[in-house]
């Protein structure tokens, strides 16, 4: 059977978590899998960097996706497969102290968030988060604190994002948060190492063409024919024909337009001493900061800050695209920390040409039901990404689940010659 299946050739476009999850499952099923990755590394927006110098102990920071949360069952299964382990960060992604609202407590925001979630459920179709905030019978300062929490976490303005995001925002329980020991990028690295064929690094794909003999992938290194293609690229690239030219019908284009790719940035500031774990948020400037445990059992001597939404990042960057003011503000709200006199590390995902933004969220009027259409194949072109998962939209777990579903569709439709028609939604 494997000999027959090996004759089926599948291209996976993108070596992020979605693409690698698809490739891993296809490879295990005996298919001939080729992964195209335009970067010189796998992981995409999962990007771990060791900041230690010389013989210093490892100090790994996550310049991209960081927290692994409760319910990440696919992540755990793949960690078990690759022999990797999680470490508890010692803090909770869900609970953040407020730095610049002395009259409002975290419990006030918790209460307002739960009320907003209940209000959102009264609408016939998902409204914007701002529509819900306007119905809150709370004082303006508290409403803005909740608005800040939404915009930071969704990486989109509250007026532009669906209130569906409140399903996650309203969860303020102090649940644990984890990272992968040694850096989250160890997972994509390990998955890539398990593939039979090496990743085609630095090979940018610019078109997928339908022909009488199958699909042709046109890349920097030439044209190659495949029986199926899994598109596992960031949302901005999938819906931009100048980046990736492929046959997308109107129903697919419409579905893609109901998803937003957020704007997010991360800031890392080295510390002189080992801190306690913490999580503190600035309402005014739409960012939060944290210190967390590493594999040693002590907190990494690094303050990490995350800023979400285009307007916040535009204001922080200024006319010179200089984020030094963000460093100052982060230090101002963390007088408890002893900062090194060294340069900050800033990562702005919209400036990265291979991602053009951060993770996804739904626009008003859209809901998680759109995930089925987002993933629905067009002929033998299949789709996977964190933007398409119904439960873990925008998250690492969502990317992995979507990738595995795309692999299942390839196996059922192409390998098993499923003759059911693939087309527009009924």
Image: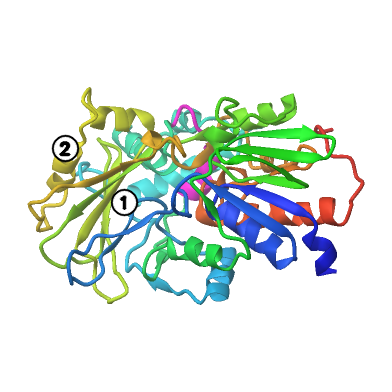
In this rendering, the label closer to the viewer, 1 or 2 = 2
Q: Which mark is residue 324?
A: 2
Residue reaching furthest to the right:
419
Circle 2 Cα neighbour tier, 10 Å, few/some/many (<14 / 14–19 / ≥20): some
Q: Nearer the viewer, residue 1 or 254?
A: 1
Q: Nearer the viewer, residue 395 or 71?
A: 395
Q: Which residue is mark 1?
A: 106
**In-image side of 52 versus 313 (left or right):** left
- Colouring style: rainbow
Mark found first going from the N terminus, 1 or 2 = 1
**In the rendered image of this protein, does residue 425 appear above or below residue 419?**
above
**In the rendered image of this protein, does residue 154 appear above or below residue 336?**
above
Quarter of the figure with residue 235: top right
Q: Secondary structure at mark 1?
A: helix
Q: Secondary structure at mark 2?
A: helix
Residue reaching furthest to the left:
341
Q: Residue at x 24, y 73 (%)?
A: 298
Estimate the spatial distance between the alpha carbons at disc 1 and disc 2, rounded to whole Å: 28 Å
Q: Position of residue 5 (x, y in %)?
A: 81, 62
Quadrant in which the N terminus appears:
bottom right
**In the rendered image of this protein, does residue 292 appear above or below residue 258?**
below
Q: How many marks?
A: 2
Residue reaching furthest to the front:
222
Quadrant in which the C terminus appears:
top right
Q: Residue at x 46, y 27 (%)?
A: 159
Q: Nearer the viewer, residue 393 or 47?
A: 47
- Span highlighted in magenta in the image: 158-169
**In the rendered image of this protein, does residue 36 appear above or below residue 179?**
above
Q: Position of residue 152 (x, y in %)?
A: 37, 41
- Residue 362 visible in this rendered orientation of the protein: no
Quarter of the figure with residue 363: top right
Q: Is residue 205 magenta?
A: no
């Amino acid at each position: 059977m494997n000999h027959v299946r090996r004759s089926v050739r599948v291209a996976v476009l993108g070596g992020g978590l979605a693409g690698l999850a698809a490739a891993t499952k296809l490879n295990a099923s005996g298919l001939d899998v080729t992964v195209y990755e335009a970067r010189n590394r796998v992981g995409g927006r999962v990007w771990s960097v060791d900041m230690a110098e010389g013989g210093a102990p490892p100090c790994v920071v996550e310049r991209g996706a960081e927290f692994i949360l409760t319910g990440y069952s696919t992540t755990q299964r793949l960690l078990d497969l690759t022999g990797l382990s999680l470490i508890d960060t010692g803090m909770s992604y869900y609970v953040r102290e407020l730095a610049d609202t002395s009259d409002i407590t975290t419990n006030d925001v918790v209460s307002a968030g739960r009320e907003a979630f209940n209000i959102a459920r009264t609408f016939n179709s998902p409204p914007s988060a701002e529509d819900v905030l306007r119905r809150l019978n709370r004082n303006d300062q508290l409403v803005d604190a909740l608005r800040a929490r939404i915009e930071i976490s969704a990486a989109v303005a509250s007026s532009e994002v669906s209130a569906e995001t409140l399903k996650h925002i309203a969860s303020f329980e102090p649940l644990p948060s984890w990272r992968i020991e040694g850096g989250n990028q160890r997972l994509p690295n390990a998955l890539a190492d398990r593939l039979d064929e090496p990743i085609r690094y630095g090979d940018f794909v610019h078109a997928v063409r339908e022909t009488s003999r199958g699909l042709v992938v046109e890349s920097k290194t030439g044209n190659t024919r495949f029986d199926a293609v899994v598109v596992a690229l960031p949302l901005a690239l999938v819906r931009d024909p100048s980046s990736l030219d492929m046959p997308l019908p109107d129903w697919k284009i419409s579905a893609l337009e109901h998803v937003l790719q957020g704007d997010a940035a991360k800031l890392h500031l080295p510390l002189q001493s080992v801190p306690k774990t913490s999580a503190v948020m600035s309402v005014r400037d739409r960012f939060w900061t944290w210190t967390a445990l590493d594999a040693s059992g002590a907190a990494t001597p690094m303050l990490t800050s995350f800023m979400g939404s285009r307007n916040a990042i535009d204001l922080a960057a200024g006319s010179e695209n200089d984020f030094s003011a963000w460093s100052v503000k982060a230090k101002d709200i963390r007088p408890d920390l002893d900062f090194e006199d060294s340069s900050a590390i800033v990562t702005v995902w919209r400036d990265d040409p291979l991602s053009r933004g951060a993770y996804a969220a739904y626009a008003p009027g859209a809901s998680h039901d759109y995930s089925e259409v987002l993933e629905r194949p067009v002929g033998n072109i299949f789709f996977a990404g964190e933007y398409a998962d119904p439960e873990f939209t925008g998250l690492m777990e969502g990317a992995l689940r979507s990738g595995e579903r795309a692999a299942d569709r390839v196996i059922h439709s192409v390998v098993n010659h499923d003759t059911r028609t693939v087309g527009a939604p009924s």
